[in-house]
Amino acid sequence: MKANGTTRRALLGNIAMLGVAAGPGRVFAKTHRFSPVQKDFSDPYLELIRLLRQAAEIEQDLLVQYLYCAYALKPAYAQLVGSPAPNATSLMGVIIQEMQHLGSVNRLLVELDARPILTRQDFPYETDVYPFPFELAPLGAVNLAKFVYCESDPVRLGHVRSISSDSVFLVDKLKTTLGGSINANHVGKLYDAMVETLADLKEAGGVRIDFDFWFEELGRVKAEGEFGHFEFFHSLYEESHPLIKAIPGIWSLPASDARYPSYQVPVNPTAYDGRENTIKDPDLRALAWLGNLNYWCQLSLLDASYRRKSKPELALAEAIMMGPLMSLAQYLPTKGSAVPFDPLSMGSEPARNEAAGKRFTHRMLEETRNYARSIERLLPADFNLTIYDQLLVAV
């Protein structure tokens, strides 16, 4: 039954009160009424689908950019990369949490009878939603400033002072790094909009999902960014992190300095031939293309996992990420190149049903295995060629 206006106001009031509770345990953020994200649809179902699709793209954008930074770090900063366990104390820990966030918004899309979204940003078209233009670049002051800003709670950020000087507000320091102005958006504002639209959908009726679970889940995702991820990137940006503070002005060092944390890797490379940023060396481009193939196999398996709530496909996707993809992504920066995580033009699962989807994934794995065999002489020493036969049996 549709709730009356009093019920709706009470519900939104409860969400808002939970949103301003202090500390990492808070559940919800301030609602869409305080967010600049504009509504496109009056129907809350259509609007929520739209927002979730944007959130899925953004979560993948962030994790890919964080991955690019992590893999470009030199061995001396292996502790900063960390291990593949969800936490906010290492780059890989943050990446795993971003993968969980990607999973959350895609699972909600599926519960709403929409398809998962596993495409990354290429040409941003909605400037009030996207945090900042997608860019693959090694870790440095500029992208750290973007990460800090977009992961932050906008209300809290205005009161945070710089670690280096109590007379300087962090937001002003970020503006200086980014050239005097900040065009980036806060990811949390998109989640604010989703929380309110979810409340509108509950009030409108006609959709049967566990609303209480999803209110809490969206709030959890937002809180992990605005507290854990913000604090982690803030410590890197202001050079207070224990693993970098021994080298003053570390982000101001020339990239050629041996003390600089990252290898000299290209910005926004591509393994597609004939493009402006195409990797020139044919051997490195071949390895980068193999990196793309593994990335696309991973996305296809993730798509299947979200559509069918399948843990086996999720485990297989993780095996690719922590196996052949990681091997290539760690090796290429030592040669001055990188896995470009190019978008797949036909999407992660273009098939129309489950059986066809499995055939597509199987063919993609065969393509990847055969290509890897064709360039075996180029592969890193730790690359495991036999994994594809194992995956093909499991799919």
Image (cartoon, rainbow, N blue to C red):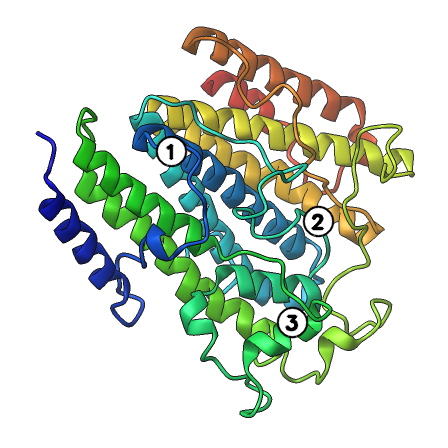
The one nearer the camera, 143 or 14, is 14
Q: Quadrant of residue 40?
A: top left
| Mark 3 secondary-structure assignment | helix
Measuring from the top left, give residue 276's x and y in whole percent: 88, 37
In the rendered image, the vertical position of residue 320 relative to residue 29, given as above or below: above
Q: Position of residue 207 (x, y in %)?
A: 21, 26
Question: Tag on residue 136?
Answer: 2
> Can residue 31 be seen from the camera position used here?
yes
- Say whether residue 374 is left or right of residue 116: right
- Image point (19%, 36%), residue name: 202
SS class, disc 1: helix
Amino acid type at mark 1: Glu
User: Which one is in front in this view, the residue at disc 1 or the one at disc 2?
Assistant: 1
Task: Please name whichever residue, 265 or 172, is drawn nearer the observer in this view of the structure.
Answer: 172
In 3D space, how far apart are the residues under numbered discs 1 and 2 (Cα atoms)?
30 Å
According to the picture, the residue beneath numbered tag 1 turns out to be: 47
